[in-house]
Amino acid sequence: MDLFEYQGKQFFASYDMPVSPGEAVTTVEDAVAAAERLGTPVMVKAQVHTGGRGKAGGVKFAADIDAVRTHATNILGLDIRGHIVENLWIEKASDIAEEYYVSFTLDRSAKKHLGMLSAEGGVEIETVAEENPDAISKIWVDPTEGLTESRCRQWVLAANLNPDVTDQAVELLLKLYEAYTDGDADLVEINPLIVTPEGRVHVLDAKVTLDGNAGFRHDLAPFDATQPRDEREAAAHAKGLQYVGLEGSVGVIANGAGLAMSTVDVVNQVGGRPANFLDIGGGANADVMAGALEVINNDADVQSIFINIFGGITRGEEVANGIIEAMNRVDISSPIVIRLDGTNADEGRALLEPHLSDRLMMEPTMLEAAQKVVALAEGTGS
Amino acid sequence: MSIFIDENTKVVYQGLTGSQGRYYGRLNRDYGTQVVAGTNPKKAGTDVDGIPIFATVANAVEATGANVSCVFIPAAGVRRAVLEAAEGGVELIVVITEGVPVHDEAYFYNKLKADYPGVRLLGPNCPGLISPGKANIGITAGHIAKEGGPVGIVSRSGTLTYQALYELKQNDIGCTTCVGIGGDPVPGTSFTDCLAAFEEDPETEAVMMIGEIGGSAEEEAAEFIAANVSKPVVAYIAGLTAPPGKKMGHAGAIVSGGKGTAQAKMAALAAAGVRIGQSPSEAGDIMAEVVAAL
C-alpha cells in the first residue's frame, strides 16, 4: 500500500532518519495555523498517491502566512492526474545545496534487494537512467546477509556524492535499509535526499510502499484508511474481495486471479469494456458470490454481468447453487451471462437450466459468453 | 516419466491438523499420493485419519522417509516452516499458503540457495504440482488431468492451470507433470527451472506455459527457450488489458513503470519461437495441433 509523503516521513522518522518538522492538514485554516506554529517560510505540499505534483502546481514555497493561505486555497481540491487533493503537508522549508536520489526495492529478477543511489537527484530517476545511466550507483543486497557498513560505504563512494557528507550518507542509508526491511516495504525512495548549505544530509521527500501482507507484524490500519479507492473498490475491500475498478460497462466475476485477468482480456478482445476485475477465489460459494454481485450491482455503469467460473476442487453443482442462492439474496439490475466449466460442469448447468431467462443466460465457452455479455451491455443482445 | 515428483514420492504435510491441510491432505491421499506424515509440535503422537503426526519435519523424515513437504501453515509461520523443512531433510518444499510477505520470500529463497542448494522450493501462493496417475501435491483437482504425456505444463495461475489440464483431457491429451509456480514476486521455482526439467524428461514432448503480467520471468523463459529448449512450447499470457499500477489479484501481477506488460512477454516468447494463444482455449487448440503433429 502506498503511503502519503507525510506518512512516509513519519515512517522514516520512526527509524531515526532526519526529516523536517511539519503537520498534515485538510483545511486552509489548519494550514495557516500549522505554518504559524512551524514558523515561515514553509512548503505547502499536496498529498496524493501519484507523481508529478510539482509540475501540476501541487508543491509551493510560502515565504509568509499570506502565501500559505493563497497556496493552500489553490492546492486543496486541485486535480493532479485524476487525484483530487484533500490533504496538505505543511513543512518547514529547507535550504538546498545539493540534491541526491536513493531507493531500495526488490529486484524480482535477481531475487535480491536493489539499492540505487545517484548524485543527480531531484529529477525523475527514469530520466537519469535513460540519459546518464552511469550516474546511478547500484547495489544488490542478499536478504540473508543484509547491508554491511563497509559495503554501504563502497556504494556511497561509487556514487560520487560530496565527499564531506560520506559518513552522514552511510549512516542514513543504513537506517533506510533497516526501515525497508524491518518495515516490510516494497519500496522506499527519497528524491531528493538533500545536503543543506550547512552540510547536513536531510530527507526532503518520501515515497514508501508497504507490503499489505505483512499486516501481522505491523499496524497498517492508518495507511489502509488513506488508500485511494473509489466507492466500488472500498465496498469490495470491506468484503475482502480482490477487486480493481475499471471504466467500462461489463461487470466481471471470475474464480482465480488468472481467470479474472483472462476474462477482462476477452471482454476487451470482443469489443466490450469491462467495469472491473473481480476474483472471488477458488471456492465460489453463495456468500462470496452474493457479496461480489452486490458490489457489481452498485456500480451504476454496469449494463451486463459476466460470471466466469472454472470448477476445480469446487464442483459445478456447488457453484450453480451458489449463484442461484446469491441471486435470491441480491436484486440484480443487469442481465447475467454465465460460463461454467470444469468439474461437474454438466451437473451445474442442469441445476441452472430452470432458472434461465432473459436476465440469466448461459453460454458454453468463454468467447461466446463474452460476445453475449458485450452485446447485452450495448443494448443489442436480446 | 515426470518431473520433480513421481509414484515413489512421500509427502509430509506441515499444517495437516489445520482445516485446509486436513482437507487437501486427504484429497491428495485419495488420489493415490503417498501422504506419510503431518507435523504439529503440540499434537505429536496423534494422527489425522490414520496419517501420523510428528513434532517436526526432521522427525517425520526420519520415521517415514518423507522426501517432499507440503506447507499449509498460515502466512505468518511460513518463513519458519520452510526453514524447518529444509533443515529436516526433504528435497522439495511446496508452499500453498498465500499472503506471505515479500521480505520473507526473498529471505528464505536466498537462505535455501546458500545453505540447502539441493532443496527445491515451489511457491509460495501456488496450487502445487501433479504428475497425473502418480502423485498430486497441493490443491489441484486430480480428476481433471489425464495421465501419461506428452505435454508438460508450467503456470503462474491456478484456475488457468486447471483449465489447461481440463482442455487437454477433453482432447484426450495427457500430462506428464503440471507445475503451478504461483503468482508471488519471488517464486521458489521459475518457468526456466521447469522448462529445463521438461527438456530433460523423455516423456515430455511439448510444453504449455501460462504466464501473466508483472516481473520478467516470461522474458527470461523466452531467452532460455531460444537457447536451450528443443521441444515445442505453447504459451498464454493473462492480463493483456490490465491497467498499469494495479495488483491484479496476485501479489506479483502488476505492470509498474511500463514494465511487465503482457505485450512485451508475448513478443519475447514469440521471438523465441513459442506459439502464443490469444485466449486460454486458443492455446489449448494450438497445443492439440502441436501434439497431433508430433
Image: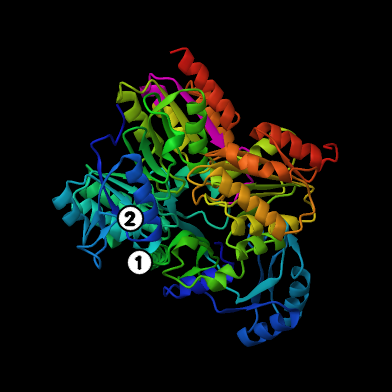
Is residue A291 part of the magenta span, yes or no? Answer: no
Mark 1 belongs to which subunit? A
Mark 2 belongs to which subunit? B
Image spot of residue B89 (x, y percent):
18, 49
Q: Is residue A139 left or right of residue A123?
A: left
Image spot of residue A103 (x, y percent):
46, 57
Residue at figure coordinates x 19%, y 62% from the top left: B45
| Label 1 in the same subunit as label 2 | no
Is residue B238 part of the magenta span, yes or no? Answer: yes
Three-letter amino acid code of the residue under disc 1:
Asp
Residue A4: image tag: none
**Residue A361 shows in the view:** yes
Q: Which residue is mark 1?
A: A167
Task: Judge by depth and name the residue closer to the eye, A134 or A376.
Answer: A376
* Secondary structure under the numbered disc 1 in the rendered image: helix
Q: Which residue is mark 2?
A: B107
**Residue A146 shows in the view:** no
Three-letter amino acid code of the residue under disc 2:
Tyr
C-alpha span from label 1 to label 2: 28 Å
- Residue B83 position by quadrant: bottom left
Position above or below: A293 against B292:
below
Give the residues in magenta.
B225-246
Image quadrant holding the N terminus of chain B, namely top left
Position above or below: A176 against A265:
below
Task: Judge by depth and name the residue closer to the eye, A76 or A366.
Answer: A366
Image spot of residue B105 (x, y percent):
37, 54
* Secondary structure under the numbered disc 2 in the rendered image: helix
